[in-house]
Image (cartoon, rainbow, N blue to C red):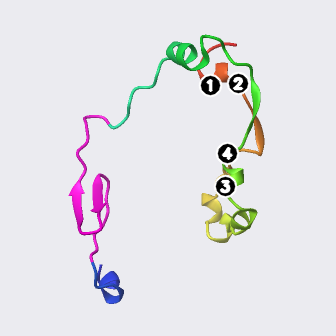
Amino acid sequence: MAGVRMHYPGFFAFGIDHTVVNVTKDNLWIREAALPETTNTSRSSSEWLLQNEFGGVMPPPVMAQNPFTPIQEQYIRDQEIDPALFTPADQMRQWAHPLPPTFPLDPAKSLGLTP
């Protein structure tokens, strides 16, 4: 924290899990989040999704477009640093790249149902 104070005299706080920083035009305050016993909601059942989202009819498999490709410029992707330059050889893991530009999407498999 001393390093931060050397360069910045203003309001500063370490953010940890469940810390909320509220910022308005006139005020700034930090509080601990008020969470329910569980932060996850239960997933809708496959049957409910099929009935309410698809009108009871299973959509056919389609070729889906990668949603991330149009919102990230190739220039940004070109800035990726080779992990071998900073990761010890015994710690190298297979690199998980994002989705391809197009990929098959089978709604039945996504809902855990057999087609």
Frontmost of labels 4 and 2 is: 4
Q: Secondary structure at mark 1?
A: helix
- Tell me which corner region of the image, top left, top right, bottom left or bottom right, holds residue 76: bottom right
Dot 3 or dot 2: first in sequence order is 3
- Stretch in magenta: 11-38
| Front one among 75 and 25 | 25
The amino acid on which the numbered mark 4 sits, given as a three-letter code, is: Pro
Distance from Cα at disc 3 to Cα at disc 2 = 24 Å
| Front one among 51 and 35 | 51
Q: Which residue is mark 2?
A: 106
Distance from Cα at disc 4 to Cα at disc 2 = 16 Å
Q: Do callouts 1 and 3 mark residues in contact (Cβ within 8 Å)?
A: no
Q: Which residue is mark 1?
A: 110
The amino acid on which the numbered mark 3 sits, given as a three-letter code, is: Ile
Question: For residue 16: magenta?
Answer: yes
Q: Which residue is mark 4?
A: 67
Q: Tell me where residue 20 appears, x and y as whole percent.
A: 29, 56
Q: The C terminus is located in which quarter?
A: top right
The amino acid on which the numbered mark 1 sits, given as a three-letter code, is: Ser
Q: Which residue is mark 3?
A: 71
Q: Residues within 10 Å of mark 3 (few under 14, many from 20)?
A: few
Q: Tell me where residue 79 appears, x and y as whole percent.
A: 69, 69
Q: Residues within 10 Å of mark 2 (few under 14, many from 20)?
A: some
Q: Do callouts 2 and 1 mark residues in contact (Cβ within 8 Å)?
A: yes
